Image (spheres, rainbow, N blue to C red):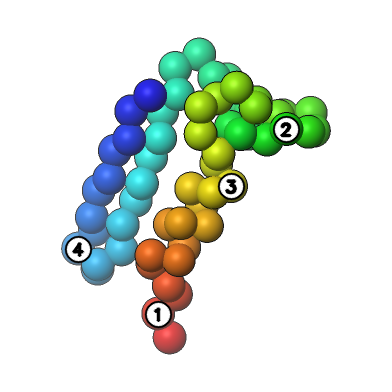
Amino acid sequence: MTHTVASCADGSEVSVYTLPEMGHSWPGATAGQLAASSAGLSATDLMWEFFATHPRKA
């Protein structure tokens, strides 16, 4: 797995996780058609963490 972070000129940030051989699935999900519980991380938790750290600007 790789994690890449890039900052933009306007102060925004992009965070990309690459999971080799994962395919089109939802890492960490335990149910559903795209579930990938053995991914080693939770995409949902990572999203919540990102949005908590980067609140929407008014």
The quarter of the picture where the N terminus appears is: top left
Check disc 4 and report the residue beneath it: 9
N-term mark: 1 or 4? 4
In this figure, which residue is indicated by the disc labeled 2? 30
Q: Give the mark, 3 or 1, whose residue is nearer the N terminus.
A: 3
Residue at the limit of the structure toward the left, as seen here: 9
Residue type for callout 4: Ala
In the foreground, 39 or 58: 39
Helix, strand or loop at mark 4:
loop
Q: Which residue is mark 1?
A: 57
Q: Earlier in the sequence, mark 1 or mark 2?
A: 2
Give residue 33's position: percent from left, percent from top: 79, 28
Q: Residue furthest bottom?
A: 58
Q: Quadrant of residue 24?
A: top right
State the residue at coordinates (46%, 56%): 49
As measured in the structure, the alpha-carbon distance from the residue carrying label 2 to the one carrying label 4 is 38 Å
Q: Amino acid at mark 3?
A: Thr
Q: Residue at x 68, y 35 (%)?
A: 29
The answer to the question of whether label 2 and label 4 lie on touching residues, with beta carbons closer than 8 A, is no
Question: Which residue is denoted by mark 3 in the rendering?
Answer: 44
Instruction: State how far apart marks 1 and 4 are (Cα).
Output: 15 Å
Callout 1, which amino acid? Lys
Residue 18, horizontal then vertical, whole percent: 41, 28
**Residue 7 percent location from the top left of the image:** 23, 55
- Disc 3 or disc 1, which is closer to the eye? 3
Residue at horizontal 51 percent and vertical 27 percent from the top: 40
Q: Nearer the viewer, residue 9 or 27?
A: 27
